Amino acid sequence: MNVTHVRAATHTYNVYVGENLRHWTADYLPKTYPSILIVTDEKVARYYLEDVKRSLSQKHVAVHTIQSGESAKSIDVFYELQTKAIEFGLERNSLIIALGGGVVGDVAGFVAATFMRGIDYVQMPTTILAHDSSVGGKVAINHEQGKNMIGSFHAPAAVIYDVTTLATLTEQEIRSGYAELLKEALLSDSAMYEAVMANDLSALTSEKLSHQLISGIDVKAAIVEADEYETDQRKFLNLGHTLGHALETILGYGSWTHGELVAIGLLFAIWVSEKIYGVKLPYNAIYRWLKSNGYPLKWPSINSETIFTKMKSDKKTVSGTIQMVLLQKIGHPVMCEIDDRHMLSYLRTFQNELLSSNEQGGKQHEK
């Protein structure tokens, strides 16, 4: 088992990564709690809920199951969970356990952040994607006008990551998670980037997956410790998300996976970086890797003006100007403000570029 220590402003918490940890959940809790509410979704509950409940057999435990998918990050589900917490009798020294992927972690964490002005919660991620969202304390729900627009910073009391739960992931869920690992690799260094790019996602070994998840968590933890409240370098973790979140909001939460749209967003960020900084980045190599691993890289049926308008409402927009995370080279991200005229031009041209890449098998035109 691997343990990463994350220093938050309010406390230090442990991220445990190992096999079969769900069977010993109580052993990894930072203290004794008089009552615990487990929040999970319908899919995860079928596989892992009973294991976790048995591991807490000496505790006063309740369970609330929400629907699976991004649509659960809604004000209605948030209110439903607050009602459950009140009815069950949670107190300020109680605990919420988020058992599931990023959606469960985000909505359950936001409930914990706001119930009685904040109680403890523990993240128990069951997806690759959630290795990223479970660390760092960002919790939120969606608004129909934007993803994660209603939320808070609330660090977990612990993260218990049982990697054996990843065995039940679909190919699409694996792809979605690896888009975030690719993001972290691009933010980190060439060694991590090359390690991720060497993967055939259809033939991942549990050993390789665990090693790369730990690497991704270490990257996230280091950035979060340096800038917990996203005033500076934590913004770099949004690489690929400016376009990705806009597409996700327009298409409707859940029609594509988060990671599939972030993958397109990463390509766009790399493409824009080359244009602005005159550098050569591995656009072609990343495009081919994404394509060979089954990512749907077709441009959604949305015009550039609609996407541009949605990007303008992103949380990272400053004084009406879109901010994007770009790369000067692997491991060297920068924040860049892009004026409206150039951004709209980039979107239109990239749309054609992606179409051309699909037709040519990833061969980019010469800069």
Image (cartoon, rainbow, N blue to C red):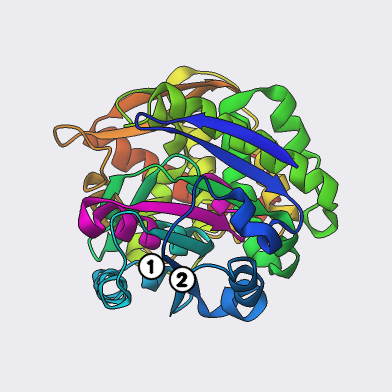
Q: Is residue 338 left or right of residue 179?
A: left
Label 2 or label 1, whichever comes before in sequence order: 2
Quarter of the image that includes the C terminus? top right
Task: Give the image location of residue 150, x and y in percent.
Answer: 24, 54
**Residue 109 in magenta stretch:** yes
**Residue 29 in magenta stretch:** no
Q: Quick one: 324 or 130, which is closer to the camera?
A: 130
Query: Of the numbered discs in the image, which one, if any, rests on residue 60?
Result: 2
Instruction: Tell us which disc is closer to us: 2 or 1.
Output: 2
Give the quarter of the image for residue 56.
Answer: bottom right
Give the quarter of the image for residue 186.
Answer: top right
Q: Is residue 117 left or right of residue 262?
A: left
Q: Residue at x 64, y 44 (%)?
A: 16
Quarter of the image that includes the N terminus? top right
Residue to which mark 1 is pinned: 251
User: How crowded is the residue under tag 1: few (<14 C-alpha within 10 Å), some, or many (20+)?
Assistant: some
Q: Quick one: 354 or 193, which is closer to the camera?
A: 193
Q: Which residues are magenta?
A: 107-132
Task: Give the image location of residue 220, x and y in percent.
Answer: 53, 34
Q: Give me the C-alpha separation between circle 2 and circle 1.
A: 41 Å
Q: What amino acid type should be assigned to the residue bearing mark 1?
A: Leu
- Image height check: is 242 above or below 63? above
Q: Is residue 223 left or right of residue 128?
A: left
Q: Is residue 357 visible?
A: no
User: How crowded is the residue under tag 2: few (<14 C-alpha within 10 Å), some, or many (20+)?
Assistant: few
Q: Is residue 265 visible?
A: yes
- Image height check: is 198 above or below 79? above
Task: Give the image location of residue 148, x and y in percent.
Answer: 31, 54
Q: What amino acid type should be assigned to the residue bearing mark 2?
A: His
Q: Secondary structure at mark 2?
A: loop
